[in-house]
Amino acid sequence: MKKETKYLIGFIVIMCLLTPLGLIAEGSAWGEWDIEEFNKIVGFIPKSIAEFKPIIEPFIPDYEIKSIGKVASSIISAIIGASLSIGIIWAIKMKNKKGSI
Amino acid sequence: MHIPDGFLSPVTYIPAVVVAAPLLVYSYKKTRDTLNEENFTLLSSLTAFSFIIMMFNIPIPGGTSGHAIGTAILAIIFGPWVAAFSVSIALFIQAIIFGDGGITAFGVNTLSMGFVAAFSASFAYKLLHNRVKENIALFFSGWIGIVLASLLVAIALGIQPMFGVDGKGNPIYFPFSMQVTIPALVGAHALFFGIAEGIATILVVSFVRKIGLIRNEKQNIQDNLEMAQ
């Protein structure tokens, strides 16, 4: 494996392990409130937001796997997300004939 | 900045999907034609980085939070089309697997954090590169990218009160107008998350240059700038 590749993999792995730092922020992003927060902040729940049924149930909602705790969930979510990102780029590379020497 | 489902009226998200779809197709082709054995590791790592950095929620005064997006890094190294598509991959995974950002809102989310951020960062870097100190050029490219992305989000959310009220007179979709969304979102991104994006852009682009992964960078930048025009 090339040296640069090792550096990059190391960098991504370290970033994945550090993602629990993102849990320090307790508040939601402004506007990205859930139904309870809407009730508290706005005083009512807009109809479309209250009644929206998810089109696809997310596999890991909010990056949290209930049974294993927030810290482990965060790291596992980061690893899944990073792996899928790399996998999709790899699949696209395979579509490029010039890329598959 | 990931707008969830139910926040936007179809009058907003359908046109956004219609605009985003051909851009995604074109940027996919650009990405496919750019990828080779040599740059695969870098592009895939930076796409993964974009996904990961969006998990680093930064708390700000007022009890809310936000994050950098990593778009400018990709835009400076790979050009705006590849950057926009790569970030869209991260956004797509976030929406489908983690429920972060709506599926109906994907068009708006990819236009803001993908295309608007990538093109504005690219143009800013083109303008500033070799004119100011490199770190300033990198910082500002990151900052302006995320700030303009947040402006599009603020507009998309802020026009929602026009699209209908229920029996009690309450808005059906996102309830705050632009007078509220623009200061809240653009303000927070200009003051906090834009700084984070600027610093991340300096650190990661410098790191990538240092480990020597950008060969022929001058040529690379030239190609990217031409692509941006």
Image (spheres, helix red, strand yellow):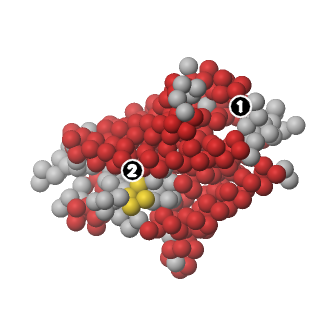
Q: Where is mark 2, residue-wise?
A: B192
Q: Is residue B53 above or below residue A95?
A: below
User: Based on the displayed image, in which of its 4 quarters is residue B214 positioned?
Assistant: top right
Q: Secondary structure at mark 1?
A: helix
Q: Quadrant of the C terminus of chain B?
A: top right
Residue B152 appears at what percent x and percent y? 37, 37
Identified by mark 1, the residue type is Glu
Do the residues at pointers 1 and 2 share their chain? yes
Number of the label disc, if any, that sits on residue B5: none
Residue at image point 72% right, 52% down? A8
Q: Few, some or many C-alpha atoms within 10 Å of disc 1 (few <14, some 14-19, many ≥20)?
A: few
Identified by mark 2, the residue type is Phe
**How many labels sit on residues?**
2
Mark 1, chain letter? B
Number of the label disc, if any, that sits on residue B217: 1
Mark 2, chain letter? B
Front residue of this view, candidates B38 and B175: B38
Residue B160 appears in the rendering = no
Q: Secondary structure at mark 2?
A: helix
Q: How far apart are labels 1 and 2 at the CA level? A: 30 Å
Residue A89 appears at what percent x and percent y? 69, 45
Which of the two discs, 1 and 2, labels the residue nearer the N terminus?
Answer: 2
Q: Is residue B201 above or below residue B116?
A: below
Q: Is residue B189 above or below residue A30?
A: above
Residue B155 appears in the rendering = yes
Of all residues, the one furthest to the front in this rendering is B133
Q: Few, some or many C-alpha atoms within 10 Å of disc 2 (few <14, some 14-19, many ≥20)?
A: many
Of all residues, the one furthest to the left in this rendering is B168
Front residue of this view, candidates A18 and B52: A18
